[in-house]
Image (spheres, rainbow, N blue to C red):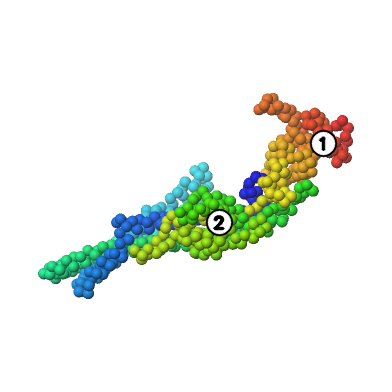
Amino acid sequence: MGRESHRQRELLDRLIPELSERLKEKDSAKISLFDKRKEIESSLSRLRELLGTNKGEIKSYHEYKTDFEKLNTEDVKNLFVQLDDARIKETILSKIRENIQEWHDDLDKIIKCNILEGVEILIPDEINDLKKWWTEKKSSLKIIDKQSDISNILIKGQNALKEFTEQLKTEIDSLAKEIETKDKEIREKVSEEAAKQVTAELRKRAGERLGRVEKLRQLYFQEFKVFTKLLEEWKEICSSLVGIHDQITGIRAKQKNEIEGNLNQFKTEEMKISLRFEPSGDRVKFGKWLKDEDFFNKDLHGNYKQKQWPEKLSMACTPIEVVQSILKQDSSMLIKTLNIDGKESIPIDEDMATKVITTFYPFTEDTDIDLQVVDEQKLYKILKIAEVEWDDFEGILLNEKPVEHLSPGQRSSAMLPLIALVENTPLVIDQPEDNLDNRLIGKVLVNILAALKEKRQIIVATHNPNIVVSGDAEQVIVLDALSDSEGTCKIQGSIDKDEIITNVIEIMEGGREAFLTRGRRYNLNEQKIK
């Protein structure tokens, strides 16, 4: 724990009960962000399919449109005007019929559902009172009757949709006959003139091609609206996540001084504990992600590793700040003045900020189809950046030095008050003397044990008599080794019991001195330890 700052933060958070709900909200927002990304990726997949339909025919929109307009002279247009109108009418009514069929199918799914599905298994067979209550409640609520009534209404709705579909079919069939008739009339008009006949046929084919592509464009446009809505929802979740994090930061900052005071209740001249707190300062995982995920590209960004772009970006911004700057195309969001080692520094300059935004902005206008398109790979990277974990930096300092940079003994000295105070569950400590010098054991550890033993159960395995004696152990268990891997309980009892005193003195080096020190402290009779 002393070597990992995020573990220190987790322990410190457990000293602030009001953080629990906010941290749950943050976890929930992260899950929502992941789920929304999957929805966006599904929409992108549908957009990709539309762009690839008929070997990417949608890309020929301008070509088809130009060809059609060349052939669609005023004379030809007048020749086809009635036929074109009929085809448009047929397309409109066919779309309505298609929508109605979707309604019908959705209603069919609802009708087949059972309101009581999965309810019976929730009632244990052995609890008769609950079964009786459910039988009465089911009857009083008239659940089965209401489901039947609702199903009948839905079936009536289905029947009405069927009637409407038949009505539309009649209209569509009539238009189909009209189209056939108009097409025949056009062929008859141009049959005597070979040039007009060829022009009419070419115009017909060009119109069919253009109509096919225009339909694809319309489908693409509709799906792009769905995609845009999902992306806006995703942005809202990002903003919500930032808002929740800001609340967490505020709570931690507010409690910092109080926690420091609690940790220093066992303070000595040799040991002063303080907390280093940097809002949103823990971006280690973000920096690692920028390196490991190949976020940057050598072809686009040059020798970015030597320029330390991953380090600079993670130093200056949180993942969501990077995302927001790219999507808003705002380079100023990346350029910040930071205090690094007591000096003001700007890790990201204007050139780097502009390069990051221009190379990762995922939207462009496709002039071939007159629609906006998305670079999926760029957007995937942006979506995933937002899910990279970042947090406040909270570190424990011992005498103004980070504990992760100290010796194991010093690290343990600083961490022990935190571990001891963080909760009331039993605390098991295995041979703390291995990492603590005798001075700290006598001045710090025994005081902690003595102060906390009334609040929680503490179990210590030790060879140090000061921990046992000066810590006022309530129950001492003397173990006798049978082998390297087995032992047995030799004796157990109170620290004031004669047999316990004798065993401690005989087994533990310094045991007699420990009892003498305790005796002087409590003004006890020293006779029984001589």
Please determine whether, in this image, residue 59 is positioned above or below residue 414: below
Say which quadrant the C terminus sits in.
top right
Disc 2 target residue: 313
Picture coordinates of residue 83, whole percent (x, y): 21, 69
Please determine whether, in this image, residue 301 is positioned above or below residue 485: below
- Ranked by sequence position, the earlier of labels 2 and 1 is 2
Q: Secondary structure at mark 2?
A: helix
Picture coordinates of residue 519, whole percent (x, y): 86, 38
Left or right: 265 in relation to 132 = right
Report the Cα–Cα distance between label 2 and label 1. Answer: 57 Å
Q: Nearer the viewer, residue 298 or 413?
A: 298
Say which quadrant the N terminus sits in.
top right
Left or right: 136 in relation to 196 = right
Residue under the point 35% across and 60% down:
103
- Which dot, 2 or 1, sits closer to the camera? 2
Disc 1 target residue: 514
Residue type marked 2: Leu
Q: Is residue 135 among the parts visible in the rendering?
A: yes
